[in-house]
Image (cartoon, rainbow, N blue to C red):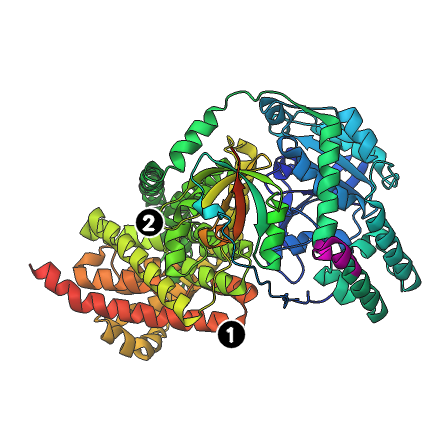
Amino acid sequence: MKIALVGQPNCGKSTIFNSVAGYRTATGNFPGTTVQLAWSRVRLDHQIAELVDLPGIYSLTSTNPAESASKKFLLSENPSLIINVLDASLLSRSLELTLELRELGIPMVVCLNMADEAQRRGTKISTRQLAALLGLPVVEAVAYRGVGVRELFREGIRQLNRPPAPAEFIAWHRDIETTVGQMERQVESNSNGQKLPRRFLAIKLLENDPEVSAAAAPELLSTARQLRAKLERTHGRPAESVVMSERHDLAMRLFEETATVTRPRSDPRAALDNLLTHPLWGYVFLLVILVAFFWAVFGFGSLVEREISGKLGLLSAALLAGLPKRGLAHVLVAGLLDGVQGGAGIVLPYLVPFLFGLAFLEDAGYLPRVAYLMDGLLHRIGLHGTSMLPIILGYGCSVPACLATRILPSRRDRFLASVLATLVPCSARSTVIFALVAFYLGPMWAFGIFCFNALVVIFSGWMLARLWPEISPGMILEVPRYQWPVWHVLARKVWMRLREFVVLSWPLLIGGSLALGLAAYWNLDRYANLLLSPLTSLLGLPAVVGTTLVFGVLRKELALIMLTQALGTNSVSTVLSATQIVVFTIFITFYIPCLATLVALVKEIGKKMTALAAAYTFVLATLMGLAARLILPLILSR
Amino acid sequence: MFWIAPRLTKSSRSKLTEVSFAPTLDKIRAGQSVKVTEIAVGQGATLQLAQLGIRAGATLAVRRSAPLGGPILVESAGSMVAIGRGMARKVYVQTLE
């Protein structure tokens, strides 16, 4: 039994999902896409059900890949129950989706979430009346406080095997009903094993829905074309717009019948928003928030790193003491310990607070404001303003950043955003910057590298946008109200993203560390170094760092751990000059995205584009490294 | 599988709007309420805007206008929507008192 949580973006679906799902939740990719779905097994009244949290949709006509995944799920996976979550404070808009979902003929329950917010806005909704007019059960809830969630599911179980009853109120204008009826008859005579309700298919054909039309018989399409032309003639606008307006009007009428609006209470968040979107102060606060964010993450990270690395260092020294030096066992144990230590001591201390902070800003609703503030600048470069969201996420990890590009409507914008997001130093690369440059040359140098990186990202965006000229469709982005994040939702989000590292990358890190140990043991690393010597000598780096660059493709932070292994010392500055440290870091920051990112890129933008992106980043890294090699000595010698 | 790949139907219907002197959304100063008279953007964007309640006949309140040719922040049907400047230029409006 499958239960689907469906609702418009920011309606609090995920909060409901989290309050019943427990911690044994998985995220999986929707077949054939990288759109992530969260699903969980839940026990409801002695029944086990699979609860699926679908990406938010405004309607069943999709405008981006995430939305089409939700739609595809609803149409082809036969859920037994739809829980339609509505933001009660946006009732009339949310009802448009409800009306559309109703046509699917799947048992359904409506959840009026954020009832407290509606009250604050002065909207009083009669749940009874709404249920009667819609012909669907309606349950009021305040999900973040856990109010109403139990009743919602109880009502849902009662609805199983009971598709929505016909409701008198839900009827369109007569001429449109007639047209829909004509289409329905045609659908009926052409239904070759089609499971979806006739009326739903008829409406979707009249709306010229690309997915439904693609699967329809040619006779149906020709009827649809005729009827669409008729609607267009009689109403003076495209058929899909006629159908949409019908739904809109009906939703408005439902709203007027069931809700009474009084004076809204004053909202302190409005004042906050005035400040944070202010044409001057908005940017000041943006800078302050980002600087404070990074400062906090690295402050916390370095504190914990020192603690953990110290303890683990002692532990590994104790473990290694018993083994004969230069023996195979010593090499293996040392490699293993280095890998474990690299994950626990270097990566996790920065990754955890970073993901937590990012999830906080995300759930609080700040990121869309950042996109709003940055759109003007990005548009000048030739990018879509919403690209800012994946790029910010890129500072955390390139993989979710690439996945986040799916919120962009055009292929070109998705390509540009994913390439730029991979150029931004992710937390692993930031770790390299901090552990090498900040540690040996001082924090100002690290800051300089971040600024330099930002400039290169801007320049790359500018250049790539011109290589692929296309007028970016422009931003249309809902900016949700601020919300105090619910901590268990936050915790799960962090855990989901962290799990990627723990189960996927960490074993790779340990394996890589073992492999390097073995390679050194059998003197294999010499060949890799020899092969890469043209590159390393071009950059003015010692040949031994060649292997570390190879490992950097597996995981960026591996390059750092491998560097100390390859150089055979923990104090890098005794072997490398200041210029070499900076050149190495710059090269690592820009060159080919790590393996996990490459995989995500292939799924998101295709093999060819990924190869292009990898080649571009490699050339960029070499040029920037070379530039640093030539320019830095001039600055340092002064 | 029900369908394999969504077919991309690019609207070939090019819309020629007559020269009109109606103000567009990008010209409206913050604090002003407007009524949308016409939206002259592509099919996809029209749909996206309509989903957020921005369609001919709707009332919007302009909240902010970002500097550097940035987006316009409008309140529509109770929610805030950022609309890129280029797009706002194609949303014709009529100011309300």
Residue at left 40%, top 53%?
A337
* Position of residue A492 in the picture relative to residue A461 (left or right): right
- Dot 1: element: helix
Image coords of residue A237 (percent x, y): 69, 55
Question: Where A130 falls versus A407 (above or below)?
Answer: above
Residue at left 62%, top 48%?
B50
User: Residue A317: which numbered mark, if any?
Assistant: 2
Marks 1, 2 in one chain? yes
Quarter assignment of residue B7: bottom right
Between the residue at mark 1 and the residue at mark 2, the CA separation in whole angstroms equals 47 Å
* Position of residue A430 in the picture relative to residue A98 (left or right): left
Question: Where A389 falls versus A490 (above or below)?
Answer: below
Quadrant housing the N terminus of chain B: bottom right
Image coords of residue A91 (percent x, y): 67, 33
**Who comes first in sequence, dot 1 or dot 2?**
2
Label 1, on which residue? A608
Disc 1 or disc 2, which is closer to the eye?
1
Give the residues drawn in magenta, as a range.
A230-240
Q: Chain of mark 1?
A: A
- Dot 2: element: helix
Q: Total marks drawn?
A: 2
Image coords of residue A162 (percent x, y): 88, 39
